[in-house]
Amino acid sequence: MLLHALMIFAYAVIPGHALALPGANTNSNVTHPQVITIPNISSQICGTEPPSEELRQAHVDLRDNKPIGPRQSSQRLLINTYMHFVSTFDQASTYPHNVRNTLMSAQVAVLNQAYMPANIAFRIAGTSYTVRDDWATDANSTLMKQSLRQGTYSALNMYFQTNLSLAPYTYNPDLVLLGYCTLPTNMTYKNAQGGQTEFPAADYATDGCNVLAASMPQSPVPAYGYDEGKTAVHEVGHWFGLLHTFQDNTCNPSDPGDYIADTPQESASTSGCPSGKDSCPGNPGLDPINNYMDYSTDECYNQFTPDQQTRMTNMYAMYRNNE
Ligand SMILES: [Ca+2]
Ligand SMILES: [Ca+2]
Ligand SMILES: [Zn+2]
């Protein structure tokens, strides 16, 4: 324990002067668990906000095949992806340069495998590394993203935070959050020449996905049950516009739910991987426990349905491409 504290001290201190990063609150008395346990509470799986009315309407229009906006061609989508690794001081020694690089490559490989059926691929366009306790716990999230976000609205920014928490500034492992992401919104307007112009980057600075670093594949501090990189797959599904498979569903056949025709109706999120789960027994199909947009554990996740694949590429064309 003393040795551990000294190592942190050595990292953070220049002889005679504490290294003070603006806004960084250091806490060198923290011990971090070897394995992170995610409580069986759905609010700690995904913190993505509910969809706007605008996004709901876009889902309705695409589901009903209304002629709105551009549709994605059959070309492969290649997404410029910026990966930002944000660590607390006490975790910095756990994630040295080579470990971070391994994690980010492994994470992109998992994303590429999961999105291959949708003809979507990701390439690392840039990376950043920050050691700041407040950002790593997701306090000052807006400032963090204003400082780190790269690229246009068509670029994916992912923030891998060592202590992503429901209660920023705390290190309580019971309050850990696996991830959340921003859903797409209209970021273009007609310019004086009648063409489409994108809003200034400052207007979408917070766009992107926050992911617990422990969910990355091969993490030295794995999140038990959620350590194969599938949290990022789920969150990026939101970035493309997908909703949860159990969204607003009471099993009433008229409930639009996730606005996806080929995911069965589901009234309750899944935890673990309970085969045969059927939260809407009167409606066709078992619950889509293997779907990336449910809340199952990583071993359970293995598919986006064909309608979800099409919806993602159409929404990308509608909201994010050509900018
Ligand atoms: Ca559905
Ligand atoms: Ca059913
Ligand atoms: Zn989610």
Image (tube, helix red, strand yellow):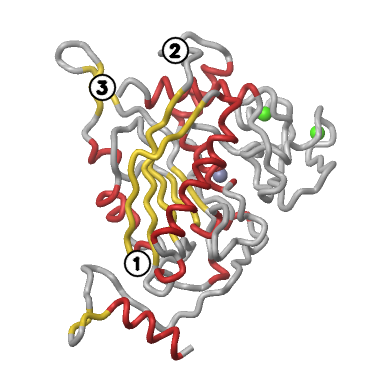
Vertical arrangement, residue 256 with respect to residue 75, above or below: below
- What residue sits right under mark 2 in the picture? 68
Q: Where is the C terminus found, in terms of image quarters?
A: top left
Left or right, 186 with reference to 195 = right
Q: Are marks 2 and 3 in contact (CB under 8 Å)?
A: no
Q: Secondary structure at mark 2?
A: loop
Quadrant position of ligand 2: top right
Residue 128 x %, y %: 32, 52
Q: Nearer the viewer, residue 186 or 11?
A: 11
**Label 2 vs label 3: CA separation?**
16 Å
Q: Secondary structure at mark 1?
A: helix
Tag 1 residue: 134
Q: Residue furthest left?
A: 192
Neighbours of disc 1 within 10 Å: few (<14), some (14-19), many (20+): many
Residues at marks 2 and 1 touching, judged by CB atoms closer than 8 Å: no
Q: Is residue 211 above or below residue 249?
A: below
Where does residue 56 sit, x and y in percent of width and height? 50, 28
Q: Position of residue 210 (x, y in %)?
A: 44, 50
- Mark 2, mark 1: which one is toward the viewer? 1
The yes-or-no answer for disc 2 within 8 Å of ligand 1 is no
Q: Residue pushed farthest top? A: 67
Q: Quadrant of residue 281?
A: top right
Do labels 1 and 3 touch, CB within 8 Å? no
Q: Is residue 179 left or right of residue 37?
A: left
Task: Give the residue type at disc 3.
Answer: Tyr
